[in-house]
Image: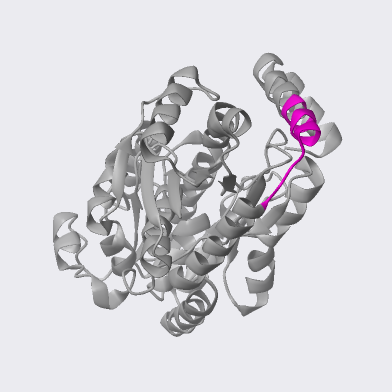
Amino acid sequence: MKVLVYAHRLELGGTQTNAIELAAAVRDRHHHEVTLFASPGPSTALIEPHGLRYLEAPTVDSHPSITMIRALREAVRQEQPDLIHVWDWPQCLDAYYGVHLPNGIPLLCTCMSMVVPRFLPSTTLTTFGTPQLVEQGHQRTGAPAVLLEPPVDTVFNSMDAVDVTAFRDRYELTGDAVDIVVVSRLVSRLKLEGLIRAVDAVDRVAEHHNVRFTIVGEGTSADTLGRHADAVNARHGRRVVLLTGGLVDPRPAYAAADVVVGMGSSSLRAMAFAKPLVILGERGFSRIFEPDSAADFLYQGMYGLGDGDLDPAPLADQMEQLVTNPTRRTELGAFGLELVRTRYGLDATADRLEGYYQVAMARRVSGWTKAIGATRTTGLRAGDLILPDQMKHRIRSLTGRS
């Protein structure tokens, strides 16, 4: 089978890493011919080590995009794929309108967002990253929805695979401080509120304990977060919070951590390094990942929504529980590592994905059903583009939909 994987812009992020690692794993385990099509970015550096064929896509700011559709059609003309696997809704819309509807090329959409876009095509087989989102996908889009949890290469991401010395030396992570680490995109959507709350929580913990908070990542909110960190450092008269910028290979940061805070794929990679973990979310959410909370996270994903109270005190308390108890850190690290190995392994996820490729290839949808689905998707997407944000938020709050 020839597969064209149309991925998100190759910024530094978990979705980009997942797309590259799974494309290579499906190729290696099932002997398919896989080509990656994506807009360039720092994660392009991950492609060559995996030996993937890469076609550079243009960079666009909105979807569906005429510019991107033209480039995608040319890629399809060159590669003649049997299936297109798209990552996330922007790429799905380009492929849906550009090559699936007019040419009938089978399409599989992977949505790793923590919300279900209501305008996803109702006739396209779509994977979601948590059981909860699979249920919501059925309810909100009518699309056939299946589970594809974020994979983790537990050999590549392990304490035995990296040397942390150079990382510690480069960022002067010396002394006996307890190191708290987050690896994240530094952007406003989903991330910034939790990151600022984490800085404020570390600010509180640092009043009584020798802790250090390392933030690894890049994005449009880096300056905002940097100013917040500078204020905390000035208040303590020492470097409590530091920002490294983006790292193509963040594994040494995970390995150097005593405690990790984060969400999504980053949380799973932290567990692969046997690190204790505090899961961040939005609206004030945070919770330690432990046996008592694991079932909730396995259902809803490594993320959560709070009640809107942004007081950093609960997060500070959770950090302090781990900072002051090395034995508990070790126990929770071992618990997370075992779970990642048994549930989120890269090979097993690649096998599951290849099965979905076969299902997508075999799907048959009538022309009438396709027309109804296309009308629905077009109308909902147009509404999202035209309606003012306040009105969209009001509609979503009334309907309970994203």
Q: Position of residue 302 (x, y in %)?
A: 58, 60
Q: Position of residue 249 (x, y in %)?
A: 27, 55
With 361 as the anchor, is 392 left or right in this view? right
Q: How is the image coloured?
A: one colour
- Identify which residue is drawn at 66% across, 44% down: 115
| Residue that extends furthest to the right in the rendered view of this protein | 398
- Identify which residue is drawn at 53% across, 47% down: 194
As displayed, is residue 253 above or below residue 140? below
Residue 263 seen: no
- Identify which residue is drawn at 42% across, 40% down: 80
As displayed, is residue 218 above or below residue 50? above
As displayed, is residue 176 above or below residue 391? below
Q: Position of residue 394 (x, y in %)?
A: 79, 26
Q: In which quadrant is the C terminus drawn?
A: top right
- Identify which residue is drawn at 63% across, 31% down: 101
Residue 400 seen: yes
Tell me, yes or no, whether the highlighted magenta stretch contains residue 374: yes
Front residue (pair 101, 134): 101
Front residue (pair 175, 330): 330
Majority SS type along the magenta span: helix
Q: Which residues are magenta?
A: 363-375
Front residue (pair 256, 139): 139
With 352 as the anchor, is 385 left or right in this view? right
Q: Position of residue 33 (x, y in %)?
A: 37, 54
Q: Quadrant of residue 73?
A: top left
Tell me, yes or no, whether the highlighted magenta stretch contains residue 315: no
With 336 as the anchor, is 386 left or right in this view? right
